[in-house]
Amino acid sequence: MRKIIVLEHISLDGVIQGPGGPNEDTSGGFALGGWISPFDDDVLGAALRRQMNLPFDLLLGRKTYDIWAPYWPLHADAWPGADQATKYVASRTLTSGAWQPCVILNGDTAEKVARLKQTPGPDLHVWGSGNLLQTLMAHDLVDAFWLMIYPLTLGAGKRLFAEGTLPAAFKVTESTAGPSGVLIVNYARAGALQTGSQ
C-alpha cells in the first residue's frame, strides 16, 4: 500500500501559506510570502535533498499544481524527480494538465485518494495543497508528516491543522535541528489517540 506523506514548511503558529516567495500564494490577502528565505542552512538543505531524491509520486491540490507546473519543468536539474513523478491533481474543474505525467482526480477526492493508496507505486508526497490537506486529514488518509518547523510566527495565513482535523496519535521517527533554528521532524501515525483515565 502506498503511503501519503505530507511535507511542509510550517511556522510555529501552524501557517503553511506562501513559504517560497512573495507571490507564491497571496490568496486571502496574505502578504508575508517568502518567509523561509532567511533560514536556509546546510542541514536543512541536506534533509530536503534526501527527501527530494526518494522515489515518489506527487499528490497536489489544483493551486499548488498551477504554481508548480510552469516552474519545475524549467528547473528539472534542481529536482528531476518532480518532473518524472506522476502528478495526481485533485480538482473540480481541471480536465487535463500541461505538466505531465498528470492524472486529474475529479469527483469525491477522499474516495479517489483512498483507492489510489491501494495501487502499486511509490509513496505519494503532498507539498503545499492546503485545501486538499484538510480533506485528507478529515478522512484519516495521511500516514506521516515531514515538517520543517521555522522559529517564527506569522499570525495569519492557511494553517496545516485547521478546523476539522481528526484526533490522531503520532510518533517521532526522526528529528534534527539546523543551525538556523529550523526543526526537521518526521511524525508517523501511531494508532488512535490515547487519553488519561480518571
Image (cartoon, rainbow, N blue to C red):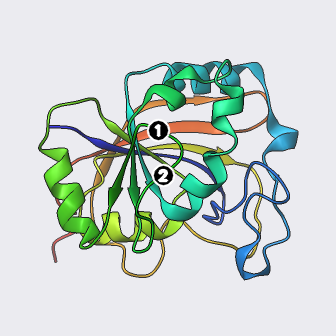
Quadrant in which the C terminus is drawn: bottom left
Residue depicted at 78% across the width and 73% down the height: 30
Residue depicted at 28% across the width and 47% down the height: 143
Q: Amino acid at mark 1?
A: Gln
Look at the picture and state if 174 lies above or below 151.
above
* Residue in front for this viewpoint, 133 or 89: 89
- Please give left or right for residue 129 compared with residue 35 in the image: left
Number of numbered discs visible in the structure rendering: 2
Q: Which residue has dot 1 on it?
A: 100
Can residue 36 be seen from the camera position used here?
Answer: yes
Q: Amino acid at mark 2?
A: Gly
Q: Which residue has dot 2 on it?
A: 97
Image quadrant in which you'd find residue 169: bottom left
- Please give left or right for residue 5 compared with residue 118 in the image: right
Mark number displayed over residue 146: none
Crowd around label 2: few <14 · some 14–19 · many ≥20 (10 Å): some
Residue depicted at 37% across the width and 80% down the height: 164
- Image location of residue 93, percent across then percent down: 44, 73
Image quadrant in which you'd find residue 144: top left
- Image location of residue 68, percent across then percent down: 62, 47
Q: Are marks 2 and 1 in contact (CB under 8 Å)?
A: yes
Look at the picture and state if 115 lies above or below 76.
below
Q: Secondary structure at mark 2?
A: loop
Look at the picture and state if 174 lies above or below 61.
above
Q: Secondary structure at mark 1?
A: loop
